[in-house]
């Protein structure tokens, strides 16, 4: 995106939390728009993936807010405060433009003095839930319209508002959702128009778990109750509406073409939507509790291979590790498969026999990755640094540690082996003193070999009294052509020795 000191006509605000998967497609879509009198501002609420780095790579301005402070309204208000544009386009980070005229269609519709807000069409994608796609078809039809009381629907996943009106009435920061509907309602009651423009279309990509679906509709129902547009008495109507939608979905499922679906999925979506809405209307006050708010707004889980017993491994959602003041959080790039990992899987690792290690465990100790979060007491590292990690992590204070005999530390832990989850996960939290930067030019696949290569160097140091009298031209033999043997041969070769490897 072209940077300019000239004030742009339009500012695009993108709210984001861990959106590295879909954000590049949105930013590329913005880059390819016919309308380019704009700036892009990303408001991040504590992402621990590469969201912020990606935004900066595309030339966007990045603002950060604390996760604890997040509401949709607060996030947007922070973005608009930093914006320079006359018009404010708002987009979800997991959308992408349908065509090159998306922004132009939004802005042109907003140029009328009587219009306060425009929202555009949202289209489902084949990987979305079938019921979600059907709802998008119902809500976002092919014809333009003007919104009027008592239907104040608008949606900030794809919208545009006038900044001068925002300065008079900001988005409500107390609401857990539906800040767009509240804003539309306010200006409609003041005599302004809110219009739907189907030509301004985006693909909206929802890849939520069922719990996330339920939480989303809970938040929205709680917000609608706070705005005064819905209440507990309409719960029977909500249930009836979802039942009718279910019947319609089942009929559509039989003739489906673009969107995939199944009977269990169709039933589950309608059940979760109805349940979340009903609970939000009944008990929306739970959103006032900090821990409950965090659960409702954020998904702090990632995937990991968890071994729960010998020969019982599965890919599961796990809690993203907490980052303590001296820690860094690492997004794993590549993980090497070690014989120790196979012993953990088979249950033959000695640590399990003597009780030093136990199931369940996330294995993996040969990995490379990028730092995605830095603890407050950490110096020398920053987000985006490529790193490798020491496997054995000792206390650093005991008599053995002071003698650099780390293995003998009575409090030692080993990443992915004993007491610590490892690199068969998307994210690993590690004390920064066990983390080492690697050159940015190094292939991250090769960087995963840093740990076994360190083992080789340690082994060679142990026999240094035998090697020190060798000439560089003296031949060496390596017994065993596994990864350690292969790396040993490579190191000796780099030292100038002719090397022969013996293996069965």
Image: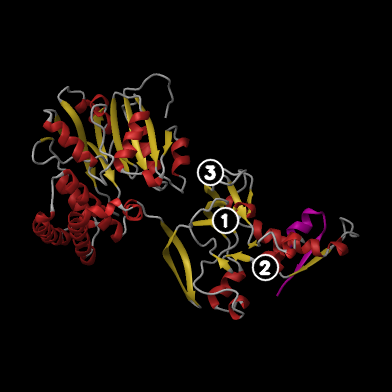
Q: Which residue is mark 3?
A: 383
Identify the residue under disc 2: 482
Q: Secondary structure at mark 3?
A: loop
* Residue visible at 86% across and 55% down in the picture: 472
Q: Can residue 197 be seen in the rendering of this structure?
A: no
User: Which is nearer the N-term, disc 1 or disc 2?
Assistant: 1
State which quarter of the image contains the N terminus.
Answer: top left
In-front residue for pair 457/299: 299
Q: Residue furthest right?
A: 469
The image quadrant that residue 24 belongs to is top left
Left or right: where 57 falls relative to 504: left
* Cα distance between the residues tagged 1 and 2: 28 Å
Of circles 1 and 3, the one toward us is 1
**Rendered location of residue 195, percent (x, y):** 15, 33
Real-space CA distance between mark 1 and mark 3, rounded to the nearest whole angstrom: 14 Å
Between disc 1 and disc 2, the foreground one is 1
Mark 3 or 2 closer to N-term? 3
Q: Quadrant of residue 343?
A: bottom right
Q: Mark 3 to mark 2: distance in Å? A: 35 Å
Q: Position of residue 236 (x, y in %)?
A: 9, 59
**Eyeballing the image, is 395 above or below 10?**
below
Q: Nearer the viewer, residue 280 or 422?
A: 280
Query: Quarter holding the C terminus?
Result: bottom right
* Residue at horizontal 58 percent and vertical 54 percent from the top: 445
Residues rendered magenta in the picture: 488-504
Query: Which residue is tagged 1?
Result: 430
- At mark 1, the secondary structure is strand
Query: Crowdedness of circle 1 by 10 Å Cα count: few (<14), some, many (20+)?
Result: many
Return the mark for residue 106: none
* Residue 58 highlighted magenta (yes or no): no
Residue 406 as seen in the image, left or right of residue 15: right
């Amino acid at each position: 995106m072209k940077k300019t000191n000239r004030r742009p006509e339009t500012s695009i605000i993108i709210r984001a939390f861990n959106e590295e998967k879909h954000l590049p497609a949105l930013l590329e879509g913005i880059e390819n728009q016919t309308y380019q009198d704009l700036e892009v501002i990303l408001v991040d609420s504590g992402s621990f993936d590469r969201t912020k780095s990606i935004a900066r790579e595309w030339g966007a301005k990045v603002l950060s807010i604390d996760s604890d402070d997040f509401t949709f309204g607060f996030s947007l208000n922070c973005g608009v405060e930093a914006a320079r544009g006359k018009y404010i386009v708002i987009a979800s980070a997991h959308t992408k433009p349908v065509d090159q005229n998306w922004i132009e269609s939004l802005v042109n519709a907003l140029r009328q003095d009587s219009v306060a807000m425009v929202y555009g069409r949202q289209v489902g994608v084949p990987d979305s839930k079938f019921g979600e796609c059907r709802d998008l078809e119902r809500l976002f039809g092919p014809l333009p319209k003007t919104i009027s009381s008592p239907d104040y629907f608008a949606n900030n996943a794809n919208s545009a508002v006038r900044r001068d009106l925002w300065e008079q009435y900001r988005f409500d920061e107390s609401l857990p959702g539906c800040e767009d509907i509240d804003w539309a309602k306010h200006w409609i009651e003041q005599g302004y128009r809110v219009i739907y423009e189907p030509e301004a279309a985006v693909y909206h990509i929802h890849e939520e778990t069922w719990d996330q679906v339920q939480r989303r509709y809970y938040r929205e129902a709680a917000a609608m109750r706070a705005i005064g547009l819905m209440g507990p008495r309409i719960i029977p109507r909500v249930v009836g509406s979802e039942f009718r939608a279910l019947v319609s979905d089942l009929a559509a499922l039989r003739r489906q073409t673009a969107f995939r679906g199944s009977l269990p999925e169709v039933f589950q979506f309608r059940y979760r939507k109805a349940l979340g809405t009903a609970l939000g209307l009944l008990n929306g006050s739970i959103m006032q509790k900090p821990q409950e708010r965090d659960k409702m707004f954020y998904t702090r889980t990632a995937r990991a291979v968890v071994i729960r017993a010998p020969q019982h491994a599965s890919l599961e959602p796990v809690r993203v590790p907490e980052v303590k003041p001296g820690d860094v959080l690492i997004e794993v790039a590549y993980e090497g498969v070690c014989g120790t990992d196979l012993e953990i899987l088979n249950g033959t690792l000695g640590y399990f026999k003597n009780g030093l290690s136990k199931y369940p465990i996330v294995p993996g100790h040969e990995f490379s990755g990028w730092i995605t979060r830095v603890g407050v007491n950490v110096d020398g590292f920053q987000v985006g640094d490529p790193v490798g990690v020491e496997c054995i992590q000792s206390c650093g204070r005991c008599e053995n540690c002071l003698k650099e005999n780390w293995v003998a530390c009575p409090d030692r832990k080993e990443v992915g082996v004993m007491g610590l989850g490892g690199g068969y996960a998307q994210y690993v939290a590690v004390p920064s003193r066990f983390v080492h930067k690697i050159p940015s030019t190094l292939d991250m696949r090769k960087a995963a070999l840093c740990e076994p290569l360190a083992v080789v160097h340690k082994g060679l140091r142990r026999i240094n009294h035998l090697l020190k009298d060798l000439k560089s031209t003296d031949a060496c033999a390596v017994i065993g052509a596994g990864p350690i043997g292969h790396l040993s041969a490579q190191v000796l070769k780099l030292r100038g020795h002719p090397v022969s490897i013996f293996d069965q």
